[in-house]
Amino acid sequence: MWPLSRETYPKQFLALAGQYSMLQDTALRLCGLPAEVPLAKSPILVCNTEHRFLAASQLQAIGVQDAKILLEPVGRNTAPALTIAALQAIADQHDDPVLLAMPADHLISDNPTLHVAVEKAYVIASAGAMVTFGVVADRPEIGYGYIQRGAASADGVYAIASFAEKPDPATARQYLDAGDYYWNSGLFMVRASAWIKALAQCRPDILQACASAMQQAVSDMDFVRPNATAFAACPSDSIDYAVMERLPARPEIDVPARVVPLQAGWSDLGAWDALWQELPHDSENNATVGETIVHNTTKSLLFSTSRLVAGVGLDNIVVIETPDAVLVADMRQAQEVKQIVAQLKTRGHTLVDNHRKVYRPWGWYDSIDSGERFQVKRIVVNPGARLSLQMHHHRAEHWVVVKGTAQVTNGDQTFLLDENKSTFIPVGHIHRLANPGKVPLEVIEVQSGTYLGEDDIVRFSDGVEPMTASAAQ
């Protein structure tokens, strides 16, 4: 989903098809489940260490205050992620809970229908089965894996006959015509003990590494950090490959594999053409987001984030605009955007990793303009947050408060700065910016000097911890 999705701000944190980000939609997805499905009210979120504050702030923004956030020091795919979540759930609840594993970057538009499928799955997962959800296919899709159902084992629940990789177009058409193949959704429901039992027999190396990592885990504010060395030694594998695809041929494991059909508006939004399919269309089959104008344009997606995007005479075209990059692609080759990202990585281009707008634990900054020996940033600091106490060897900074009240440390002085006031930070001065107020603080920062890189910084203390009442005074 480049250029909107970047390494430091991937698609699960984006609001692509509604008010909430995909992570927030996932966390809210189970609201309203019947009492017969007693899943834990507080979710367990497994994410990359680099995304911890972004994930926590997005959950807090929707009222999820008590999520347990497990921080992977390195990515090891979904099987280790589910394993550390299962071990954490058992430790938290001192019980054997039923887990529903949901990727945070999928779209499901019909939550009530999902709830019906979850209720069916819960019954058999409670009894020891491992359940996946098979999306009823409505087209010969080559971008998804497939599940072939077997015999019906209960009302609306099937055994699993086989799994299939992403097919070519002819094979995908055969699967659709056969009527007994589903898209593999990547959603799973299983008791924690059943998952651990199956993993112990299928991939004991993964279980051993994860158990070691969690035994040595440490708590850090709202986060749980598995031991980095032990987790890095864990093999990388998916839930499907590590366990799920092995269960139909391994009855001795005594964890039956089942599939529940799902028709709930599911999409993994793997590329821009998938988003086009999910968004509302105009009379010419165009989908538009943001400030856009189209003329003589059909079956296209225009997505604007910061300025007007106009399309004339387009057909089957994707146009994605961000402040620092624009993508124009044939809709039929939307999957090939990954080749552009690969080229950018080869060139060492920063557009793979960061947006112009960069999120930090304390808020965000936007690099508005830059040139020889100067750079201008718009900085927003969240209420009660502060940046690190720091110093620069090569640049000076001029801060202008646009909105809110700033608490400024400048050398040996600490003082408040109101709207429309400014201060100058000379080269080599120790300084800090903080927001003691209850509304976001907005500052324009003008940097000048011989070197303006983000690595010209000496930190004396970080800004992660919130301001105390005395510090805010």
Image (cartoon, helix red, strand yellow):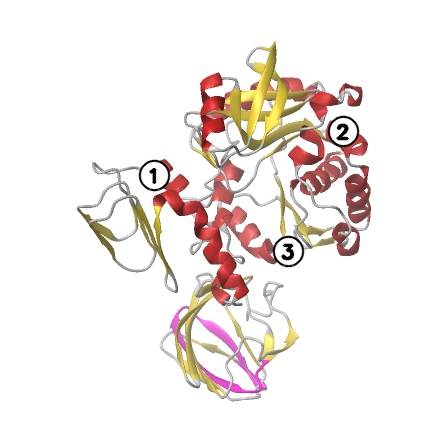
Question: Of helix, strand and loop, which mostly describes the magenta segment?
Answer: strand
Q: Is residue 37 visible?
A: yes
Residue 208 on image: x %, y %: 82, 42
Dot 3 alpha-carbon crowd within 10 angstroms: few under 14, some 14 to 19, many 20 or more? some
At label 1, which amino acid type do we have?
A: Leu
State if disc 3 and disc 1 touch (CB < 8 Å).
no
Identify the residue position indicated by label 2 in the image.
198
For residue 413: magenta? yes
Q: In which image quadrant can residue 45 be found?
A: top right
The segment highlighted magenta reads: 391-414
440 sits left or right of 203 in the view: left
36 sits left or right of 209 in the view: left
Q: Which mark is residue 49?
A: 3
Residue drawn at x 73%, y 34% is 93
- Tell me: residue 58, above or below residue 253: below
Q: Earlier in the sequence, mark 3 or mark 2?
A: 3
Residue 140 on image: x %, y %: 43, 28
Q: Nearer the viewer, residue 394 or 315?
A: 315
Residue drawn at x 51%, y 49% is 58
Identify the residue position indicated by label 1 in the image.
279
Tag 1's secondary structure? loop
Q: Earlier in the sequence, mark 1 or mark 2?
A: 2
